[in-house]
């Protein structure tokens, strides 16, 4: 079915992104994401990259989580493969190979897309 194909495609994409960024492991409550690239299609069927900054990203790697005052680990609210909404500013750009990723604290993520 289509839903199986979609989930397999997203798993494949997450695996590919993870293998690219596997050298960088976020610490504490930090999250490594890759921005989603939206493209505009012309009437003739040609795809053009948009110049507009996209605030949607896919989670590539997550740290173990922050700790509270007693030293107890606070679990992360996002996981590898999640699609999230980023703030307009605040993430640190990280270039790994020829790809650009962004590193930010989990608390800076505005929301998580479901479905």
Image (cartoon, helix red, strand yellow):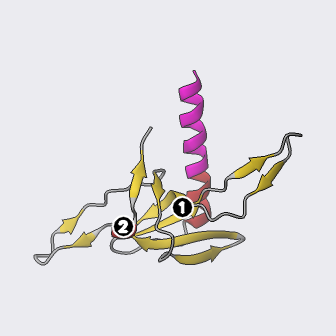
Q: Is residue 30 left or right of residue 43?
A: left
Q: Is 24 above or below relative to 20?
A: below
Which numbered mark, 2 or 1, is in the foreground of this view?
A: 1
Is 48 situated left or right of 16 in this image? right
Q: Quadrant of residue 100?
A: bottom right
- Which residue is the extreme one toward the right? 44
Residue plotted at (33% across, 68% down):
107
Does 38 sit above or below residue 8? below
Spot the residue most to the left. 70
Q: Residues within 10 Å of mark 2 (few under 14, many from 20)?
A: many
In depth, the one of 92 and 39 nearer the eye is 39
Q: Quadrant of residue 6?
A: top right
Q: Residue at x 39, y 61 (%)?
A: 110
| Quadrant holding the C terminus | top left
Q: Position of residue 13 (x, y in %)?
A: 60, 48
Secondary structure that dominates the magenta span: helix
Q: Which residues are magenta?
A: 1-14
Going by the picture, which residue comes out furthest to the front?
Answer: 43
Q: Which residue is mark 2?
A: 106
SS assignment at label 2: helix
Residue 68 pos. (x, y %): 16, 74
Marks 2 and 1, how far apart at CA? 15 Å
Residue under pointer 1: 55
Q: Mark 2 vs mark 1: which is more N-terminal?
A: 1
Disc 1 crowd, CA 10 A, few/some/many (<14, 14-19, 20+): some
Q: Residue furthest top?
A: 1
Picture disc at residue 42: none
Residue 109: x and y in percent read 40, 64
């Amino acid at each position: 079915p289509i839903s199986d194909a979609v989930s397999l495609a997203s798993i494949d994409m997450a695996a590919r992104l993870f293998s690219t960024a596997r050298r960088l492991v976020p610490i504490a409550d930090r999250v490594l994401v890759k921005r989603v690239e939206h493209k505009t299609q012309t009437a003739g069927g040609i795809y053009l990259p948009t110049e507009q900054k996209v605030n949607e990203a896919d989670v590539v790697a997550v740290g173990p989580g922050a700790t509270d005052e007693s030293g107890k680990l606070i679990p992360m609210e996002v996981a590898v493969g999640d699609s999230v909404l980023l703030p307009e500013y605040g993430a640190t750009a990280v270039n790994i190979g020829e790809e650009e990723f962004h590193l930010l604290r989990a608390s800076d993520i505005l929301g998580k897309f479901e479905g």
